[in-house]
Amino acid sequence: MSRLTLLALTIALTITAPVLRAAEPLKALLITGGCCHDYEKQKVLLTEGISARANVAWTIVHEGGKSLDHKVSIYSQPNWAQGYDVVVHDECFANVKDVDFVEGILAAHREGVPSLNLHCAMHCYRTGTDMWFEYLGLQSSGHGPQKPIDVSIIEKHPITNGLSDWTTINEELYNNLKLWESAVPLARGKQGEGDKPGRTDCVVAWTNHYGPKKVPVFCTTLGHNNDTVADARYLDLVTRGLLWACGKLNDDGTPKEGYGGK
């Protein structure tokens, strides 16, 4: 093959070859703040840990100090979740009981915005109705003393594919009062003998599909202490949960092309 022919072929291939561009980052809105947790540190651990594993750009709303009854300001805005691919609820406002306010939060998810819900998000918005718990797929009302939790993977799923059982440091095991039929448990946690279903033997990670549009929701009750939030096993789990909710997780648990970490 002559040099001229080779040059022409190279130019032709260059012109016709598809241009591979990095995927646009997933736009994630993290809502955090409230009682009983070190959210100042945890928001950094969480966002940096997830972004090391997935192509995610963050907007953080951190409000409410250590209160239980703060109404996060963004939730009062019309179409508050517009423009985001996923919302991460990592807040702790159990005493917000305003049904209309909570309905404003849920409307965004019911209309199609996926979500990741962490730890005390499961204890928020106790309006006296099941509206928040139906969205989550599980109702919890409290926890026992902090002790190590033996976490067991119980469901074959893209989120759990390849993940191993592990034991946490001293942590809070949230009780289970009710599991909705739409929820799929992925992992259970046991403290001590684990002989009290719903109290010392509980679902700690699950998926849900919310509302008529069956919008993806991932939840885990793990994550009270900073060392747990910083744990690579925890970050692997919640990153996969976020990617799954956004439709960006392969069946083998890896990010879809363009959505891996830095």
Image (spheres, grey):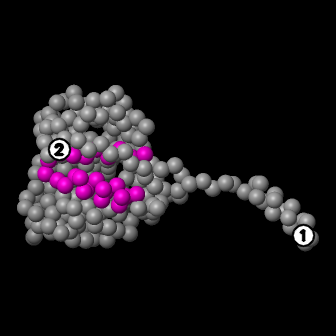
Q: Residues within 10 Å of mark 1 (few under 14, many from 20)?
A: few
Q: Residue furthest left?
A: 145
- Disc marking residue 251: none
Quarter of the rendering occupied by the N terminus: bottom right
Residue at 10% x, 55% y is 143
Report if residue 32 is visible in the image: yes
Residue at 8% x, 58% y is 144
Residue at 26% x, 61% y is 229
- Please state the horizontal and vertical placement of residue 126, each as a whole percent of the image: 14, 39
- Quadrant of the image occupied by residue 230: bottom left
- Identify the secondary structure beneath mark 1: helix
**Residue under label 1:** 3
- Please state the horizontal and vertical placement of residue 29, each as a whole percent of the image: 35, 44
Report if residue 204 is visible in the image: no
Measured Cα–Cα span from mark 1 to mark 2: 70 Å
Q: How many marks?
A: 2
Q: Which residues are magenta?
A: 27-51
- Please state the horizontal and vertical placement of residue 208, each as a whole percent of the image: 31, 47
* 44 to 178, vertically: above or below: below
Residue at 13% x, 42% y is 67
- Disc marking residue 65: 2
Kind of residue indicated by mark 1: Arg
- Identify the secondary structure beneath mark 2: loop
Q: Which label's residue is closer to the chain start, 1 or 2?
A: 1
- Residue 40 inside the magenta-drawn segment: yes
Q: Is residue 150 left or right of residue 13?
A: left
Kind of residue indicated by mark 2: Gly
* 125 to 7, vertically: above or below: above
Q: Is residue 51 left or right of residue 8?
A: left
